[in-house]
């Protein structure tokens, strides 16, 4: 649908992959909605990889599919933190060699990479003085050759035109051109640069990364999902490299595990903590509404049964319960509570209006009274949400799992609520009446 090209920037979903350098480039492609195309994002990325095999001039092509939700980075992401470069490099080599032997781990990379090759010039000071040259003359000549220099300007038709002198592209890439650059000395004799300079080719300075203020190296890897999972790879790695071994061989080193598995676990932990706080808030709010400590449990006990619909739906659709689907599940919790709340509150009102009527009849009447309202509400909500899940009329693949969780969870939970809430209501009332029944039974025994 659209594409954005970024020159000199390498983008990524992880903080270690945001790199600005002249030898990087990124292209971000926005696809049409998945409901309007015949191919998945994975099929498109595979085709791009196949079609770029004949292209030369680049060292590595990395294709990343944005999966929605919070950024999670690579499948495997390991940070080695140590202020001593040699120890950090030793730990890096050990971890990489271990990862290569773990089944399922692939595309292992490290941030400890040399920069672009550089040419180091070492001045021959004695020869420089003997040939009548100065250091500033050497520097000025090299700067003019590679960066260019404004030599003069002239005026043409009321406009100033400048003349900029610089070597052409081919000569700037040729080290022999650099060696044969001619420098005029104090007697105007032209001296080749190689007469006064030694040339050394050295690796460029790497990009340095820090974690909590300390220098670090990050190793990333992908995981072949058909063979293993990120969690299994981490478990195997930690068994092969226990903390005791790291402390012994790599003194003062800290290993921080991240990536998809770690970020996903942290996201789900946060979601479950939020859900627990929400349930506590619901419980105490219902205590004020019902003026009862036991009746809020009737509402809360219906929530797990509503989750059965979500699990069943995702199992039938062969999809994972991801971050967005769990957000939809938390939203479903609120709807389930609302439906159960309406039913329990109506039964309580009937008990106040008709105190002489048997409880079983009141519960049956209350459930029948609210059946039509809950059913129509459910049908209209499901009819509005499921098109989002299936991409009918346009959809977003990131939000579709949320719609699937809400739609099927609500469709399954409504009939369950109509059965469970009356049953739980009668069950709790029976439990509450046990002490009074025991007191009535004791005098009859004598």
Image (tube, helix red, strand yellow):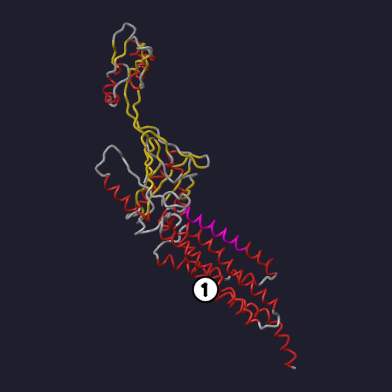
- Estimate the x, y position of residue 51 in percent, counting from the top left: 26, 46
Which sits in the foreground, 389 or 224?
389
Q: Mark 1, residues whose alpha carbon is within 10 Å: few (<14), some, or many (≥20)? A: some
Residue at (44, 42) in percent of width and height:
16
Q: Residue furthest bottom?
A: 446
For residue 160, above or below residue 31: above
- Estimate the x, y position of residue 74 in percent, counting from the top left: 41, 49
Q: Which region is colored magenta? A: 262-280
Which SS does the magenta portion mostly show?
helix
Count every numbered label the image shows and give the total.
1
Magenta stretch: includes residue 371 = no
Q: Please, what secondary structure does the residue beneath circle 1 have?
A: helix
For residue 443, above or below residue 153: below
**Quarter location, residue 165:** top left
- Estimate the x, y position of residue 168 in percent, counting from the top left: 29, 22
**Quarter location, residue 277:** bottom right
Quadrant (top left, top right, bottom left, bottom right) of the C terminus: bottom right
- Estimate the x, y position of residue 201 in percent, counting from the top left: 32, 28
Which sits in the foreground, 197 or 147?
147
Can you identify the residue that label 1 sits on? 415
């Amino acid at each position: 649908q659209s594409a954005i090209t970024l020159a000199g920037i390498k983008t990524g979903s992880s903080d270690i992959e945001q790199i600005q350098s002249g030898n990087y480039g990124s292209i971000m492609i926005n696809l049409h909605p998945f409901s309007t195309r015949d191919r998945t994002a994975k099929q498109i990325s595979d085709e791009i990889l196949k079609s770029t095999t004949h292209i030369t001039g680049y060292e590595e092509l990395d294709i990343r599919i944005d999966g929605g939700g919070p950024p999670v980075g690579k499948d495997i992401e390991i940070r080695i933190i140590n202020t001593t470069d040699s120890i950090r490099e030793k730990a890096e080599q050990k971890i990489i060699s271990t990862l290569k032997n773990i089944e399922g781990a692939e595309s292992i990379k490290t941030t400890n990479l040399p920069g672009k090759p550089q040419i180091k010039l070492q001045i021959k000071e004695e020869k420089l003085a003997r040939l009548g040259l100065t250091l500033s003359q050497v520097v000025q000549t090299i700067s003019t050759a590679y960066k260019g220099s404004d030599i003069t300007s002239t005026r043409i038709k009321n406009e100033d035109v400048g003349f900029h002198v610089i070597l052409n592209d081919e000569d700037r890439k040729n080290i022999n051109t650099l060696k044969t650059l001619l420098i005029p000395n104090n007697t105007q004799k032209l001296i080749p640069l190689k007469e006064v300079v030694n040339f050394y080719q050295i690796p460029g300075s790497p990009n340095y990364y820090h974690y909590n203020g300390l220098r670090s190296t990050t190793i990333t890897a992908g995981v072949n999902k058909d063979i293993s999972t990120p969690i299994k790879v981490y478990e195997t790695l930690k068994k092969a490299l226990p903390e005791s071994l790291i402390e012994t061989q790599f003194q003062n080193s800290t290993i921080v595990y991240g990536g998809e598995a770690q970020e996903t676990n942290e996201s789900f932990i946060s979601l479950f903590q939020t859900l627990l706080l929400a349930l506590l808030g619901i419980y105490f709010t219902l205590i004020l509404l019902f003026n009862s400590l036991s009746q809020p449990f009737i509402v809360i006990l219906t929530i797990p049964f509503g989750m059965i619909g979500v699990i069943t739906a995702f199992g039938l659709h062969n999809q994972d319960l991801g971050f967005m689907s769990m957000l939809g599940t938390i939203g479903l919790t609120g709807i389930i509570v609302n439906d159960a709340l309406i039913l329990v509150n109506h039964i309580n009102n009937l008990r106040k209006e008709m105190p002489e009527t048997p409880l079983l009849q009141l519960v049956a009447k209350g459930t029948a009274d609210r059946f039509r309202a809950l059913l129509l509400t459910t049908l209209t909500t499901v009819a509005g949400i499921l098109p989002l899940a299936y991409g009918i009329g346009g959809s977003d693949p990131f939000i579709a799992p949320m719609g699937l969780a809400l739609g099927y969870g609500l469709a399954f939970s409504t009939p369950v609520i109509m059965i469970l809430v009356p049953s739980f209501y009668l069950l709790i009332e029976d439990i509450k009446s046990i002490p009074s029944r025991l007191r009535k039974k004791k005098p009859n025994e004598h």
